[in-house]
Every structure is written in structure tokens, then in C-alpha cells.
Amino acid sequence: MGVLGATRARPRGGFPLVLSVVVVVISLALFWMAAFTLWWQMHAWRTPEALAATRFARPDGELRFSFSLLLPARHEQAVLEHTIERLLESSHLNYEILVIVGHDDPETAAVAERAARNDPLRVRVVTDTHAKKNKPKALNTALPQCRGDVVGVFDAEDIVHPELLTHVDHAFSSTGADVVQGGVQLINFHSSWYSLRNCLEYFFWFRSRLHLHARKGFIPLGGNTVFVRTEVLREAGGWDQDCLAEDCDLGVRLSSTGKKVVVAYDSDMVTREETPGSLMSLLKQRTRWNQGFLQVYRKRDWRRLPGRGQRILARYTLMTPFLQAFTGLVIPVNVLIALLFDVPVGIALVSFLPAVTALVTFVFEVVGLHDFGRAYGLRVRLAHYVKLIVGGPFYQVLLAGAAVRAVWREQRGRNEWELTSHVGAHLTDTREDAHR
């Protein structure tokens, strides 16, 4: 009995040196990863001047550019008509809309062709005949037919502000930019617990993080509300049709050749979208984005960036899927070690460092949710703050799962496009829903 008791107590009696090293390394890695991410997310809020500089400058009334707006749509018959109608409300006088539909998607094609008949001067339909379809192939199909000075990209479910093109026009002329990245905001934060966090992610990314990337000269562009001078886009060869994150890839390639990117986020003029309709849809979407980042990392275009700091930022950003996968796998190891062994005080203190950054991040997210509600005139209630905090760990597990899945798919050579479906959840009156 005494021998058995001693055997049982042995795992908790001492703490092996190798495990001490493992715990310290993992804890410090998690701490610095979280600290860097939080610091970058806070970029726009560091000073009032920095926050003010993120907005569009007021237009001077003169329109200097023409626009070709690309609208790829696949199985989007439920939301496409509304998006085209909103684009046609633009106050800008010189633009065209190219709706790109698949030859095997008659329902979406019927909506696009009806819009073209109703306004043949503004709307044209481009048919994508690729056997295997994805967004970059659709965009490249339409690029040769663009007549405008600037090519803009939107998604089929977007709600676009009528003044956006006028502000983008002024941004090009006043800054000499090659690329203008506008804001995109998921808006239906009330739909589910994960929609709340998804909306806040977009808020931090477009409101703050992308501005830091533009300032540093390395930027993974957003998937829509991005505008590129047509000659610059054609010179770059359009989009990489084999990449699952064609927007990120384009941004990296343009950054590596020194093109100037301007980012502007204005809550009055952001392009509004909806969150994925289910957890599985969100998981697949994040898997695709993560795998796309891995593909861009492996292409090594980022290594042509002139500055060492730019290359470090690029490497860290593009390796995010690896880092998230690492986090998802090692945190359980830390927990098991804490449960099975008597951890020395010094190591225990080090192991608590990630919890400190997590706590600070939660506080920043609570403040950010309040700022998000105020910016969009939405009533954020106590229940939303509770969902934000309680759902945090579960959301991180989902992100880690998507990262692990992306690494696995990339290693297996699986790169088929997993389409995110849209149902128009953001087309309802969000203000009324938020009061319920």
C-alpha cells in the first residue's frame, strides 16, 4: 500500500527540468504573441490624431477617375439584386458594374441579366466558363473587359454607401495612391454569440490593424471594397487564381514592388456584410483564409520587401495560421502539466503571463464593443457583453481548429474552394433587432 501510494504521488512530487523548459517556453511564446497582436490592434486608438487620420478626407467636388466595379457572384441569387441596386445609387457619375456569373449557375445569371436589361449603360454580365470555379478566376475573367481607370471589387451581398466612390476618387487624387482599401464591416452582431465576436474582429482589423500595415508598407488587402488602378492591376497580372486568399496575395505582391496603399475606415461609408450563417460555415471560411495565408507565405514574394521590419511583419502575419494551430495544440499541454505536477512558484508565475494578456485583451474588447455600438448607432446591452466574454475561449478554440485544419489541408494538397453562402441577415434593420 505504501509503495502504491508513493507511485501515485511521484508525478506530483517533482517537476522535471525538461517540463520546466517546456512550460517557460510555451508561456513566454503565448505571452509575446498575444502582446504583439493586442498592440497592433490598438494602433488606431493610441492618440486622437491617429484615430482621426483613419477616416476618408472630405472630397473637393471634382471627379477625376472612372471605375469598373467587379461583382463576382456564385449561387448568390438571394442577395445579388439588392447589392446591384445599392451600387446603382452611387453619387459618382462615371462607373460601370461587371457582374461575373458562372455558366453553370442559371439562377444567379438570371438576376444579373435582369439588372443588365434594366440598366444596360451601367451593368454588364460577364460569364466565367472555367470548369473549376473560384473568386480569383472570376475576377481575372472580367479584368480584360474593364474600361475604368480604377478597378473596384465587391462581394455579392455587400451594402455599399452611395458616397463611397466619390470619397475613393478623392483619396486617389489627393494621395497619389496606387491602391485604396476601404472599410468592410460585418453588422449583424445580434444574430449569434459567434456573430458578435466576428463583427468585432472586422471592426479591429479594418478600423485599426490594416492602417498599421499600410503605414509599415506591407499590407494583406481585404477581399472587397478594395480599389486598384487598372494599369497597376494589369501590370501585376491580376489575381493568382490558384490562391485561396487572392486578396492577401495581391496586397503582398503590390507591397513588394513598392506600390502605395491608402487605407480609410469611415463608419458612415463602410461596406456592410453579414457573418457566416453557421459555425461550420465560419470554420470553412477561416480554413480557406488561413490556408491562403500559408500559400502566400510559401510563394515568398514577401521576401522582396525592402525593409527588414517589413519582412518580419510579413513573416509573422502570414505565419498566423501556424501560430494559431500551435496555440490550439500547446495550451492543453500546459493545462495537463499544471494538473499532473506540483509546479514550482517561479514557473507558475511565468505560466500566468498569457492570462495577463488575455485579461487585458478582454478589457480592450469590451471597450471596442462599446465603440462599435456607438459608431453604428446600435444598442449594445449587458447580454452582449456577457456573450462577448463567455464566448471568447470557445471562439479561440474555433479559430485554432480552423488553423489546424488549414495546415492539414495544405500538407495534403487539398485546395478546393469552400464557398461561403449568404442569406441576407445584414439586410434586416439591425437597430430594431438590437433592441429586442
Image: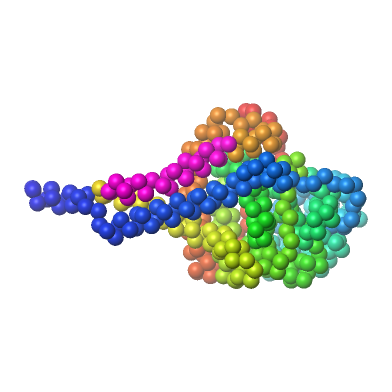
Viewer can see residue 313:
yes
Q: Residue at x 67, y 56 (%)?
A: 215
Viewer can see residue 277:
no
Against 293, residue 339 (above or below) is above
Task: Tell me where residue 103 appears, x and y as whole percent.
Answer: 75, 64
Please state if 315 lies on the left or on the right of 150 as rendered.
left
Q: Residue at x 44, y 53 (%)?
A: 30
Please state if 100 lies on the left or on the right of 252 as rendered.
right
Give the colour scheme of this rendering.
Answer: rainbow
Task: Tell me where residue 364 appears, x and y as whole percent.
Answer: 55, 40
Please state if 370 lies on the left or on the right of 5 as rendered.
right
Dominant SS in magenta: helix
* Residue 136 falls in image quadrant: bottom right
Residue 190 on the magenta span: no
292 and 372: which is toward the camera: 372
4 and 71: which is toward the camera: 4
Against 40, residue 151 (above or below) is below
Against 237, residue 245 (above or below) is above
Q: How many marks?
A: 0
Residue 352 on the magenta span: yes
425 and 109: which is toward the camera: 425
Q: Residue at x 61, y 34 (%)?
A: 370
Q: Quadrant of the C terminus?
A: top right
Q: Residue at x 35, y 46 (%)?
A: 349
29 and 201: which is toward the camera: 29
Q: Which residues are magenta?
A: 343-367
Task: Tell me where residue 171 appears, x and y as whole percent.
Answer: 80, 52
Task: Tell me where residue 256 appears, x and y as whole percent.
Answer: 67, 68
